[in-house]
Amino acid sequence: MRVFWQHGYEASSVAVLTAAMGITPPSLYAAFGDKQRLFLAAVDRYLGGSDRVTATIAGAANAQDAARDLLTAAAIGGTGADTPAGCLLASSIVTGSTAAAGIREALAAIRRRIETALRLRIEGDIDAGLLPAGSDAEMLAGHVFAVVQGMSTLAKDGAGRDKLLRVAAGAMAGWPGPR
């Protein structure tokens, strides 16, 4: 996971991955089938399980808390002392080979699933009167994800946790208030 997080999917060679894992390439293929499946297993571990983030969104007191929690987690997770800077999902964006198209789509699907969970939570709060009726749930969820992606880039460029937490707070300052 750390190799992919540090270098991204495409730059993480099987040789580097197997060296980091202390195994041989045949062992990697026997356990995971291929590099793509290893990467997807690493992403699942990074997320704490495929449904943990969406469950956290659903379990928050309201959509505003869910959004704040996502932004705070991005600031803290992207600036860990013992982990690479930034977000694994953001720093592993695949741009090149057609062989990696499945990974590109898998990452996009994960991000869309999380963003959709947040949008649905926002829509629920609009319906419940916790947010103004004219609130744009799609824009709010998209804004949170744009900020998370930007925070990952800032962390990769050396921004510290304090700065990212202030960016997260600034993003939440524009959140619509109750009626």
Image (tube, grey):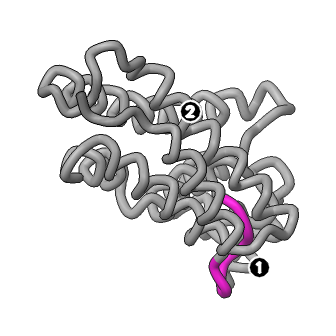
Which amino acid, mark 1?
A: Ala
Q: Quadrant of residue 12?
A: bottom right
- Image quarter of the N terminus: bottom right
Looking at the image, which residue sits at the far left?
A: 128
The image shows residue 156, relative to residue 127, as above or below, that is below
Q: Quadrant of residue 126?
A: top left
Tag in front: 2 or 1: 2
- 70 horizontally vs 165: left or right: left
- Image quarter of the C terminus: top left
- Nearer to me, 155 or 14: 155
Residue where numbered disc 1 is placed: 19
Crowding near pointer 1: few (<14 within 10 Å), some, many (20+)? few
Q: Position of residue 97 (x, y in %)?
A: 84, 31
Residue lying at 40% horizontally and 57% vertically, measured from the top left: 69
- Nearer to me, 113 or 65: 65
- Find out whether residue 81 is within the magenta segment: yes
Residue lying at 81% horizontally and 48% vertically, measured from the top left: 10
Which amino acid, mark 2?
A: His
SS at badge 2: helix
- 133 horizontally vs 147: left or right: left
Residue where numbered disc 2 is placed: 143
- 179 horizontally vs 175: left or right: left
Residue lying at 74% horizontally and 52% vertically, measured from the top left: 91
- Nearer to me, 54 or 43: 54
Residue lying at 63% horizontally and 62% vertically, measured from the top left: 166
- For marks 2 and 1, the one nearer the N-term is 1
Residue stretch in magenta: 80-86
- Find out whether residue 170 is within the magenta segment: no
Q: Position of residue 114 (x, y in %)?
A: 41, 38
Q: Position of residue 52 (x, y in %)?
A: 31, 55
